Image (cartoon, rainbow, N blue to C red):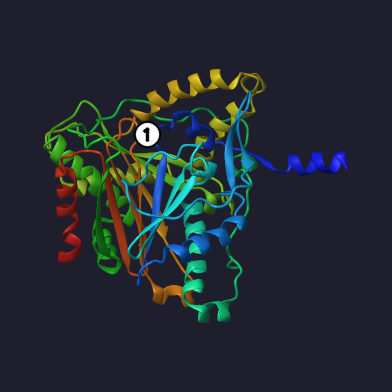
């Protein structure tokens, strides 16, 4: 009996994935490391039904049904046996810090406003792909409760293609012998008057995908390359006024590793590459900037380079000497490295990609959008996602001035003029 109990306890905890180890160290009230993904329905949301949907779905997702603990050498997850967090009507600014000691110790929150359901996730749990998977199943469950005919037709289980896999894909795909490849040269930073504490400004631009593809074709660029270039162009025009700069304008571009390494994990599995535009001469055309950004991204987004990026971090995790260092000393070192690397990028532009939902639910769903919270040195960020024939680019910013957004949106006007 004692052995059985011991085995049950051992199954109730889990390691943080390699990327997740960063977030508990750097997160706090001023930098939450929380992102939001929202689904917009074609009907008003019922708080009671949304709570019931969350109560039903959460037990199926062990990646979300955890709390975080502080060990001697590492943080770790422990199964959270408390009821699901309470669903609330949105009443404050989004992406605020999720304290491990509140929210029933859960590391995500669900709220709603009119016909929009918001999922906010502390990045320690999972990346955008994991967040989308959870939000879709939560939405499906909600719609089945709101429309009993769907329940009768589809049943009450998860979709057959929904993954509950919890492997650390960084460790599974790690190979020895890789060197550090992160850029640590300081980048140009966007500065200015800030909004109030915890305040964040959000703007969405909706782009028709067929017309956007035609514009990208003219520049010889992918949609992602074009949008990253347009965002950096807005910073170049409004902050540098088209003049040369001693420091480059650089954007973090997260890359989902699952397609490159045949992974279906629900945990974090991404790396960061940097799209770099260094304005050294007097003037640049937008076409030149698109070419520079496209070349910068294409040189990095290949399996070998992506593997190099995460292998260096995994090698540190597997180092026996470093593993034996107490957690409080690890935290000091991690913060120091993060502060230096964080200033190597002006902004972040992340693309969640095309969100697909089951055909039976499409008539109830208007669309999706997502955005990121602010981080050290980065006061403005962009997030891309698409649903059906519409792409949404969301700009989140802690700055009172919106001139970068205006310049960016003016640049995108050519999509509607094509």
Going 56% across and 49% down the picture, which residue do you hit?
A: 64
How many numbered callouts? 1
Residue 22 falls left or right of residue 184: right
Identity of the residue furthest to the right in this view: 1
Q: Residues within 10 Å of mark 1 (few under 14, many from 20)?
A: some
Going 15% across and 33% down the picture, which residue do you hit?
A: 281
Q: Secondary structure at mark 1?
A: loop
Q: Can residue 199 be seen?
A: yes
Locate the N terminus by quadrant.
Answer: top right
Going 39% across and 66% down the picture, which residue do you hit?
A: 45
Along the viewing direction, whichever of 11 and 90 lies nearer the viewer? 90
Measured from the top left, where is residue 174 in percent x and y? 62, 38
Residue 208 falls left or right of residue 41: left
Q: Can residue 106 be seen?
A: no
Above or below, 324 relative to 415: above
Along the viewing direction, whichever of 327 and 198 lies nearer the viewer? 198
Image quadrant in which you'd find residue 185: top left
Measured from the top left, where is residue 79 in percent x and y? 64, 44
Locate the C terminus by quadrant.
Answer: bottom left
Along the viewing direction, whichever of 50 and 374 lies nearer the viewer? 50
Identity of the residue furthest to the front in this view: 48
Image quadrant in which you'd find residue 31: top left
* Residue bearing mark 1: 31
Residue 357 falls left or right of residue 321: left
Measured from the top left, where is residue 26 in percent x and y? 44, 29
Going 35% across and 32% down the picture, which residue do you hit?
A: 30
Measured from the top left, where is residue 136 in percent x and y? 48, 63
């Amino acid at each position: 009996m004692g052995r059985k109990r011991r085995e049950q306890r051992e199954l109730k905890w889990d390691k943080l994935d390699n990327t997740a180890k960063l977030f508990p160290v750097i997160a706090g009230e001023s930098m939450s490391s929380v992102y939001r993904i929202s689904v917009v329905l074609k009907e008003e949301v019922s708080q009671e039904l949304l709570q019931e949907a969350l109560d039903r779905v959460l037990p199926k997702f062990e990646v979300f049904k955890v709390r975080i603990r502080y060990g001697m050498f590492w943080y770790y997850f422990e199964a959270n046996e408390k009821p699901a967090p309470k669903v609330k009507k949105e009443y404050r600014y989004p992406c605020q810090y999720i304290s491990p000691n509140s929210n029933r110790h859960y590391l995500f929150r669900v709220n709603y406003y009119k016909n929009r359901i918001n999922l906010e996730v502390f990045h320690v749990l999972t990346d955008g792909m994991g967040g989308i998977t959870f939000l879709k199943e939560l939405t499906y469950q909600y719609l089945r409760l709101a429309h009993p005919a769907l329940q009768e037709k589809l049943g009450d289980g998860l979709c057959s293609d929904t993954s509950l896999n919890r492997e650390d894909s960084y460790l599974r795909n790690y190979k020895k012998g890789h060197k550090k490849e992160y850029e640590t040269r300081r980048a140009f930073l966007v500065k200015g008057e800030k909004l109030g504490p915890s305040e964040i400004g959000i703007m969405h631009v909706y782009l028709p995908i067929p017309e956007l593809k035609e514009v990208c074709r003219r520049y010889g660029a992918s949609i992602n390359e074009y949008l990253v270039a347009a965002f950096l162009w807005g910073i170049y025009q409004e902050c540098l006024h088209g003049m040369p700069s001693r420091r480059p304008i650089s954007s973090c571009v997260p890359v989902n590793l699952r397609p490159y390494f045949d992974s279906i994990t629900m945990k974090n599995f991404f790396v960061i590459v940097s799209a770099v535009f260094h304005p050294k001469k007097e003037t640049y055309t937008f076409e030149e900037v698109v070419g520079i950004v496209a070349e910068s991204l294409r040189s990095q987004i290949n399996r070998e380079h992506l593997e190099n990026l995460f292998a260096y971090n995994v090698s540190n995790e597997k180092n026996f000497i470093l593993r034996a260092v107490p957690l409080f000393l690890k935290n000091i070192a991690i913060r120091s490295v993060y502060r230096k690397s964080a200033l190597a990028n002006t902004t972040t532009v992340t693309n969640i990609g095309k969100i697909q939902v089951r055909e039976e639910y499409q008539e109830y769903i208007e669309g999706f959008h997502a955005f990121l919270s602010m981080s050290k040195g980065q006061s403005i960020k962009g997030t891309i996602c698409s649903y059906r024939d519409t792409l949404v680019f969301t700009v989140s910013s802690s700055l009172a001035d919106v001139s970068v957004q205006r310049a960016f949106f003016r640049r995108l006007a050519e999509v509607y003029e094509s």
